[in-house]
Structure formats: structure tokens, C-alpha cells
Amino acid sequence: MGFRREHDSLGEKDIPEEVYFGIQTQRALENFPVSGIGPHPDFVRACAFLKIAAAHANRELGLLEKKIADAIIRAGHEVVEGKLLDQFVVDVFQAGAGTSHHMNVNEVLANRAIELLGGNKGDYSIVHPNDHVNMGQSTNDVFPTAMRIAVWVSCENLIPVLKKLEKGFQKKGKEFDSIVKSGRTHLQDASPIRLGQEFKAYSRIINRAVSNIEEALESLKELSIGGSAVGTGLNTDPAYREKVVERLSELTAFDFQVPQDMREEMESMAPFVKFSGALKLLAIELTKIANDLRLMSSGPKTGLSEINLPPVQPGSSIMPGKVNPVMAEALNMVCFQVIGNDLTVSMAAQAGQLELNVMMPVIIYNILYSIDILENILKVFTEKCLAGITANSERCRDYVEKSMGLAAALNPHIGYEKAAEIAKEANRTGKTIRELLIEKKIFTKEQVDRILDIRKMTEPGIPGKTKNHSEKKD
């Protein structure tokens, strides 16, 4: 293995000839051997988009020589296409504000541009990482801008997955619409509900969560690029920021905007807290749904067993034939991780001082990590679990007929106290409320059938009442 000699303001180092990064990246590798986790590919691509746009702007403004700008742009497009991703190597836990990663980007693009111009890597007299690739820029405006771009790019995949999940619940809502089951509140018997209504509610919950995420995304449209070091635009042409944002919108097909105040966009991480909070809210809702499915499918002989989750693998190393709700369990674990990631984002966001938040690398790492694991688990959950759920309609019917919750339908006919006595007697004797009403001749069988019409009990109305007259027997 050969080496090339590079220098920076701190001295010189030998850099392996074949790599595209340079001395500042090498220092970061030596300084931060922390997690072994490198930058997210979407974040690397976001940085490349930004460098392409900046080179375009500086070329148009006559600040960057055309051949140099063109080489940087070509190198940037190669990264966007997925090339050279193995050259972005700085640990996510690194120098504050992301300076190490930023210089990694500058060095890789500079060295690839040098090659495209016929030179040898490390000959920064041809293309310089700071003077050319980083012209008019600072880590302090590049990093938060790239963060915003990366979240938009990542959500291109997450949003469709969530909408497919929503449609999956809608489909099951229709499929199970005729199945009446016992509702449960406080984990105790409650009035009847249709299984389809429960699944339809899940679809609406996901729909609302998607709306929250899309709303939070909108707050990430304003880009701080052009703010330079502290948001004042030092060393940038007055037209630079508009040109970069316009080009970024063209490159990504997202409608990015120039903010009203560059300082606000560079100092405050509030939009990322809002977005992470939307992911957390989604995780909380998904946890509730996963828990419901696990509970309703419990059994098969000693639990509720109202629904069946598709078996995807054996559930025990010791108990033959056991099958567990593993997809729902995996979803739970992902949700717990996302909630924890949100706490990290919150703590990092409040840790900024004065003109800069130096905790940006851990913020974007946790947000993109949350997006990834949510997207991945929901793909397989929808396919391997939700799509194959079936209902045990007879079990549901049996539960609802024996439920104490049916007593609620008696209130308009015999009053709360009398209905409570019937419910307690049913619980004590093991007889159903239907049986006791007929046995005690409180109502005729026909009247009981109308009052305890379990399907009608799942919609607004007073079962057994005609106009203003009770069906109660004199």
C-alpha cells in the first residue's frame, strides 16, 4: 500500500493513496473511534446535493472557475448516484457541529474532482477542499441544511409505507365489519363493538400520524445555507443563497425556501424536535395498536383468541407447536427505540449555545435511524402480519353474548340500578343477561332480541325503542 503526504494547519500525515478522503478525515478517524457507525447514506447524498448546488451558484456568479466547478458538480453527482459512499467514514459521534464529516465531504469531492481533471489525489493546487468545494460555506450552515435535505429524502420512502399500512387497516376494517365482539374498557367487559370498527379506528390513527409527520416536514423546508459561520452571510455573494436554494429545489424536486432569518435557522433545532416528536407520536400509537393485536390474538386456548396473527416462525425452543406474535413484538421494540431516540434529539436540541448548536450530528443520526427502522419494520409488519390477520367470529360472538357490557342497553328500559342488579346476577350465576331477562319475565324473548340486538348496539341509537315508547313489558 502506497501513501501520499498531506498537510493541514496542525502538521503533516501520510494518507493511503487509494482513499479519496484527506488529512482532516484521517485525524477524525484517529480521534473518534467511538461507535463504528458511519454517516447515513441519505445524509451523504444530501451533502452532495448541497455541494453541487453551491458549485453551480458560485460558477454562475463568476466566483468559481468553470472547469473546477464542473468537476465538483460531476463528483457530487457520482456520490448522489451511490458511488464513493465507502469514503465517508467519520463516526457519527464526532467533533461538534459535524466539522469532521463536513471536511470528509469536501476532501472526497475535491480528490474526485482532481482525478476528473487529470490530476492525482492530494494535489489540492488543482481543486482545494476549502477554497473550492467549500467556497462561501461553513459547517455551521452546511450541516443544518444537509440535515433538512436528508430528512426530506428519507421521508420519500417512509410516507408511502405508512399510507400502505393505513390502507391495510382500512381493508381489514371492511373485511371484519360484520363481526361483533365485546368491547373492553379498563380490560373489563364493555358494550359491543364491531371488529371492523376497531381496525377502521387504527387506520384513522395512522392517517392522523401521517398528517403530523407531513406537517412537521413543512417546517424543514427553510434552508440556512448562505448564513456562513454565524448567519450573517460572511464571504458569500448577496445572490448566493437564493441561487443555491433554487438549485437544490431543482435537484431534489422539493420546494425548499430561503428563511426570513438565517440566524434562527442556524441556532434553533426546533423544527427537528417537532419532526422527531411526530415520529415519537407515531411510535406511541403503533405501540398501542401492536399491544391490542397481541392481546386480541392471545391464546390460542387460554387467551382471548378473537383474531389470528399469521404464523411466521416457531415460537419456542422448548414448547413444541408454540407460535408467538413476533411481528407485533418487533414493532413494539422499534417503537421503544424511536421514543428513546426522540429523547436524545430533545436533549441535543436544548444544548446549543449562542449562534450554533454543536450537537447536530447526534440529532440527524437519531432522526434518520428512527425513519429507517420505522420504514423497515412497517414494511414487513404490513406484509407478514396485518395482511394475513383472520377473525375467530364464533369466539367473538360467544364473548359478546356473555358480556356484562350488554347491560348498558337496558338503561333506557329499566334504569341503571335495575340493570346493574341483572349484570351482577349474571356474573354470579354464570347465566347470560339475555337468559335472565327472559327467565325473570322482565321482557319477552322478542323484546329481548330487539333490545339486545348486538349489531344495533354498535351504532348510535336506543335498541328496542320505537319512537318514544319503551319495549318494556307491563
Image (spheres, rainbow, N blue to C red):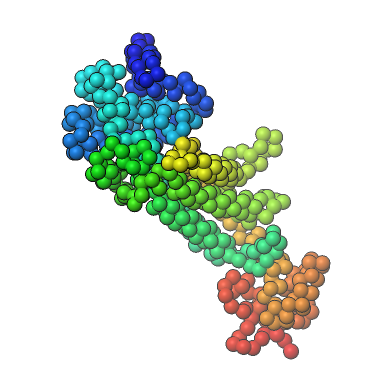
- Is 60 on the left or on the right of 52, as rendered? left
Quarter holding the N terminus? Answer: top left
Pinpoint residue 215: horizontal percent, then vertical percent: 42, 55
Q: Which residue is at the front of the view, 17 or 265?
A: 265
Pinpoint residue 252: horizontal percent, then vertical percent: 30, 44
411 vs 474: above or below? above
Pinpoint residue 432: horizontal percent, then vertical percent: 74, 69
- Is 441 on the left or on the right of 241, as rendered? right
Quarter holding the C terminus? Answer: bottom right
Tell me where residue 111 sits by quadrant.
Answer: top left
Q: Which residue is at the front of the view, 353 or 277?
A: 353
446 vs 109: above or below? below
Q: Residue furthest top?
A: 2
Q: At x 40% / y 23%, what residue is drawn?
A: 25
Q: How many marks?
A: 0
Q: At x 47% / y 57%, what residue is drawn?
A: 207
62 vs 417: above or below? above
Q: Is residue 237 visible?
A: yes
240 vs 104: above or below? below
Pinpoint residue 321: horizontal percent, then vertical percent: 66, 40
Q: At x 62% / y 88%, what residue is drawn?
A: 468
Q: Is residue 83 visible?
A: no
Q: At x 27% / y 38%, what residue is drawn?
A: 236
- Is 50 on the left or on the right of 432, as rendered? left
